[in-house]
Amino acid sequence: MRPPYPPPPERSAELRQRFAEEARSERPDLSALCLLVGAEADGALDETGMDTAQMELDRLAGQLPFRPGGPMSWATALHHLLGTREGFRGSPGDYQRLESSLLHEVLRRRRGLPILLSVVWMEVARRAGAPVYGVALPGHFVVGFGPQEQQVLADPFDGGRVLTGSDAELLVAGATGAPLHPSMLTPADPLDVVQRILNNVRAWAAARPERSDVGLWAVDLSLLLPSHPARLRYERAQLLVQRGEFLAGAAELDAYAEVVAAVDEPAAQRVRRQARSARAMLN
């Protein structure tokens, strides 16, 4: 089945403005940002659909016991509710689906990537008053409960299974071959979570050259975040050229070359040559 179709240009422009405003607000709303990403991907997700997704998160939060206790009690309650009763979890096949990175689809299918399932855990738990946050382990996103000295980790991709210290060490070793460092267990900033979600979308699109449209909107949203890698401008230029938008791609390459020139003039010269080659494709 072909992944979701994008919204019309007017709707897309409105969504991007709202995304930029939310990302720059004093306390960015993670669920709102994820749903705006979903609406940029899926033209069928309208305001009613976004409200329905938020109401589902509210409904799930209402199913949790009232302040069950410390971090372990919260983690266990979320595991029983979301993992066991509601059936949220992941599988290897979820990595092949764009829907696995879209919050509204994850809520509908009860399946998704580790980071999107973690968003569900965080948003449901937060609404219920839990001390919850995301933990961006290398190669695998999980959730944490409680302060660092009492921290309890859970893996939403595995139905919210509570992790022992050795479980976390194995996850990190499997992804990097390196030992677990305490710095890896710090809470993830909401905007970093959104950037990582968009990175996953870009990786999905990069493996499917025929879906460069998806890669382009994911880069465009990433560029709207207050902090982003300058190299995204280069990636955007390459996507434009790949899509046959040679003049726009060349202009983007020239703009990126100006940024690079301040630190690496030979690299800037290479980028300018790429810009000239892009313009020559029109001849």
Image (spheres, grey):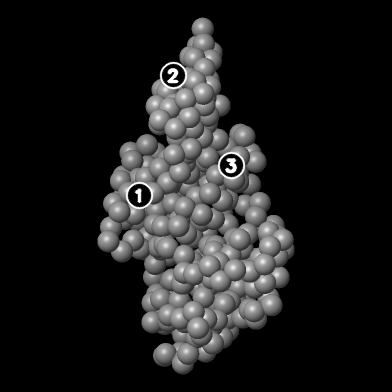
The relative height of residue 213 versus residue 97 in the rendered view (above or below) is above
Between circles 3 and 1, the one closer to the viewer is 1
In the image shown, does 25 or 188 lie closer to the viewer? Answer: 188
Distance (Cα) linking label 1 and label 2: 27 Å
Q: Is residue 14 left or right of residue 101?
A: left
Q: Is mark 2 on a helix, strand or loop?
A: helix
Tell me the number on the disc at residue 110.
none
First along the sequence among labels 1 and 2? 1
Query: Are circles 3 and 1 on residues that touch, CB within 8 Å?
Result: no
Q: Nearer the viewer, residue 14 or 164?
A: 164
Count of numbered marks: 3
Residues at circles 2 and 3 in contact by the CB criterion of under 8 Å: no
* Residue 226 disc label: 1
**Residue 205, which numbered label?**
3
Q: Can residue 199 be seen in this view?
A: yes
Amino acid at circle 3: Ala
Q: Could you say which is closer to the camera, residue 181 or residue 226?
A: 181
Report the Cα–Cα distance between label 3 and label 1. 23 Å
Q: In which quarter of the image is residue 95?
A: bottom right
Q: Name the residue under label 2.
A: 247
- Residue at image position (46%, 92%) is 69
Judge the density around disc 1: few (<14), some (14-19), many (≥20) Cα neighbours within 10 Å.
few
